[in-house]
Amino acid sequence: MKSWLTTTDHKRIALLYLGTMTLFFTLGGLLATVIRVELATAASDLVTAETYNRLFTLHGVIMVFFFLIPSIPTFLGNYLLPLMLGAPDLAFPRLNLASWYVFVAGGLLTLTAMIAGGLDTGWTFYTPYSTTFSDSHVVLAVLGVFLAGLSSVFTGINFIVTTHRLRAPGLTWMRLPLFVWSLYATSLILVLATPVLAMTLLLVAIERGLQIGIFDPEVGGSPLLFQHFFWFYSHPAVYIMILPGMGVISELIPCFSRNRPFGYEFVAASSLAIAVFGFLVWGHHMFVAGQSYFASVVFSFLSFAVAVPSGVKVFSWLGTMHRGSVWLTTPMIYALGFVALFTIGGGTGLALAMLAVDVHLHDTYFVVAHFHTIMVGGMLMAYLGGLHFWWPKISGRLYSERWGRIAAYILLIGFLLTFLPQFLLGTQGLPRRTASYPPEYQFLQGLSSAGATILAVGYVLPGIYLLASLVRGRPAGDNPWGATGLEWQTTSPPPPHNFAAPPVVTDDPYDYPRAPQPTAIGAGHV
Amino acid sequence: MTLLAMPFEVLPAAASATSGAVDLVVFLVFAVIGLVSLGVLLAMVVLVVRNRRRPGNLTGRGHDPATIWKTELGWCALTAVVFLCLFTLGAVTFDRIERVPTGPDVLDVAVTAKRWMWSFQHPSGRRELSQLHVPAGRVVRLHLSSEDVIHSFYVPAFRLKQDVVPGWLRTAWFRATAPGTYALACAEYCGTEHALMRADVVVMEPHVYDHWLAQGDDPRPPLAAAGRALFQKLDCGACHETRLRRRAPPLEGLYGRPVTLRDGSSVLADDDYLRRSILRPDADIVADYQGGVMPTYAGLVDDDELLLLVAYIRSLADAEGVSP
């Protein structure tokens, strides 16, 4: 126990993060369950409207700040970055451990706020509601999120320095795995954008305590100033969430197509382009909030610009499968699910970036469905795909491939049934964040709640068979998927400091046409 | 638009002069999304089936670098062109639906949002709560203010949404095309009973509306008249109506026109400008006038009274100014 709590081994810290975030994800999921049960009927009957508002707020805060943002970087990134670079550890192992403690402290503060009575501002903390009118625990929650942000900055700095300084001999920038490129782009956003969120949230806390006029118009502030500050971080944060997921997919598809990635340079560059453009689109959250017409037009234009590099990714993934040998394993099912759902999520994002369309759809269920398609359909699929792909490396065991495939298909079906109806609820004009709704929306809401139960089954299953594999799973061997990449050249799980002898890189990455054939079960045939 | 009505009624029945244009854009972008998503899905199915791992196809065959560059750049160009078209379409339609029409026939309604109800005041002075009666076929110009937090005025059938931000006075408009009752919802989360912050927009034939308006035995004076009375009570005319034009700018013919400020910039004299000038007179000083003359009226007039004063100044829009 003590050796775990004082470890500076990046692999153990990654597992600490995995455990903590699984708890947060479970909590966020339970909150979502109550929300979906409440919404199964039109009236506000299971919980009061006041409780409902606290439920969706905490669901958002916990899922965004304590699961989606840290998930892939702090678990898979922490575990894999040194391995992929051929390094013994991250550049700052103790900063890495500190980041976990700060993260846990932030989580505990937020949980305290929840136990003390909760928070009802929505995860967006819009002013002047949050600064003046809400009588919930805004300051506690805001400080919790502040700490989670600080932990992100630690991780971002660590990743950037590690990528610059600790690459194995011969591992040039253009030989880096695409996952490393995406982590690098993500870290840039973490370091540059998070301080703005931290500052904004502190100002909310200060205004709440001291009644100084920053965001509340009653005392001379501006509510729109808050929205500019908040989205200056929170839109790039969307890319913090999705870029590492794209990186995972860029590892999975070449491996299970046994092929070189189509357009390596384009995929790598598109990560950086998304990170840069992502900073310039925040105003598309404010088309009807009263920013100037000119600003709205510019932000709409830039939002379309960020879609071009995203399109490059989708196209390149399909190109990788072209002339490939496609092996439909559990991780690959998640990868293909990601590609399909990311296309739908991104496409509906374009609809929202269109000025005239957004006027109708803004702040409706359409927006809820859109970002859940990107976050749950995209990011979470990538997370699970990555978890299954690297699970043999991390645990040293193979899980049940049959159960893996069943769970992946259940998740896909559950997802579609939960969120496709919400697109229609939005086009029909149902605002989001409503505890009750007029009866004409009953059918689609019921369909969505039914889908959520299937989705829940899909989440529980991997928890069962992955844990079971720790006891009953066959040994994985060093490289069960026949994958390229330095992490597969060491033992499963890797020893402390990762490699018996420091690896030397002499070739381009992803040489799958010449890679060893897989040893995992079912590898020899279809 | 019958396509959109099938099979689930994707959009609510259109009922305003601009909703048809919006629906067309929505339909186009949804068609693009649908086609692209289906294309990606189809490509994946074909690739998975045709290139499946089997004896004789255990390794990939790589790609020709020249093909990669050509297709990647071609793909970027293709998406950029499609996106540019969508952007332009959205922006042009936005311009059309946002541009507030003017004219003698415009009906000005003051809207106040507060947790968790909507209240309305007609030019005649008639007030109503949670119901807004308007005539069909006439431009209704809304002057929106909030007493507490941010709300959002959303009528799905009109494809109209405008956030109502405390500290600002927003303007929005619609022209209803068919009599009927349409839902108005608050779209911006505003606290406990946000879900119940709904109202009905009752659109009536013009003569029925006139009848309804006449029926009201509300003793309140018309908006502009009430504003005029308040204007006199506060003695605003001492500076704004004096013939010695050195103390304050005249208000006749001001509303809806650009005003040149002392720093050389120009600002449109809309609702929000007037509100700001009453509450923070020195925020924008008109060219040729001194700052520091007018005291702030923040705290002296509440949101409802501000709407009255703005209504009065608006009523002077077509009045002849006394030439200096």
Image: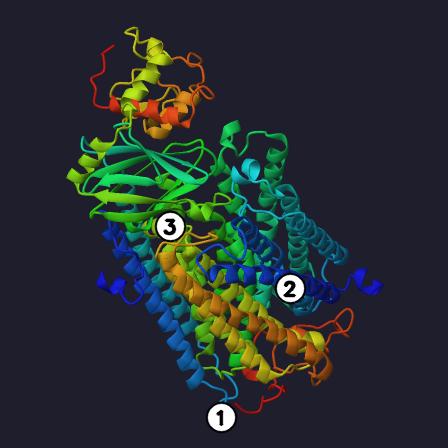
Q: Quadrant of residue A370?
A: bottom left
In x, y percent, where is residue B190? 48, 43
Crowd class of label 1 (few under 14; some 14 to 19; many from 20; radius 10 Å): few
The label on residue B56 is: 1
Crowd class of label 2 (few under 14; some 14 to 19; many from 20; radius 10 Å): many
**Residue designated by label 3:** A301
Question: Would you say the residues marked 1 and 3 are in contact, meaning their CB atoms lie under 8 Å apart?
Answer: no
The answer to whether residue A220 is visible is no
Residue at (55%, 68%) from the top-left corner?
A382
Q: Quadrant of residue A515?
A: bottom right
In the rendered view, does A425 fall on the left or right side of A175?
left
Give the foreground label among 1 and 2: 2
Q: Quadrant of the N terminus of chain B?
A: bottom left
Q: Quadrant of residue A483?
A: bottom right
The label on residue A77 is: 2
Identify which residue, B220 or A12, lies in the foreground.
B220
- Reply above or below: A390 against B295: below
In x, y percent, where is residue B191? 50, 44
SS assignment at label 2: helix
In the rendered structure, which disc, 2 or 3, sits on the residue that comes first in sequence? Answer: 2
Residue found at the very far bottom of the displayed protein: B55
- Residue type, label 3: Phe
Label 3 chain ID: A
- Reply above or below: A455 against A71: below
Residue found at the very far right of the displayed protein: A2
Label 1 chain ID: B
- Reply above or below: A139 against A273: above
* Residues at marks 2 and 3, CA–CA distance in whole angstroms: 33 Å
* Residues at marks 1 and 3, CA–CA distance in whole angstroms: 48 Å
Q: Quadrant of the C terminus of chain B?
A: top left
In x, y percent, where is residue A115? 67, 51
- Residue type, label 2: Gly
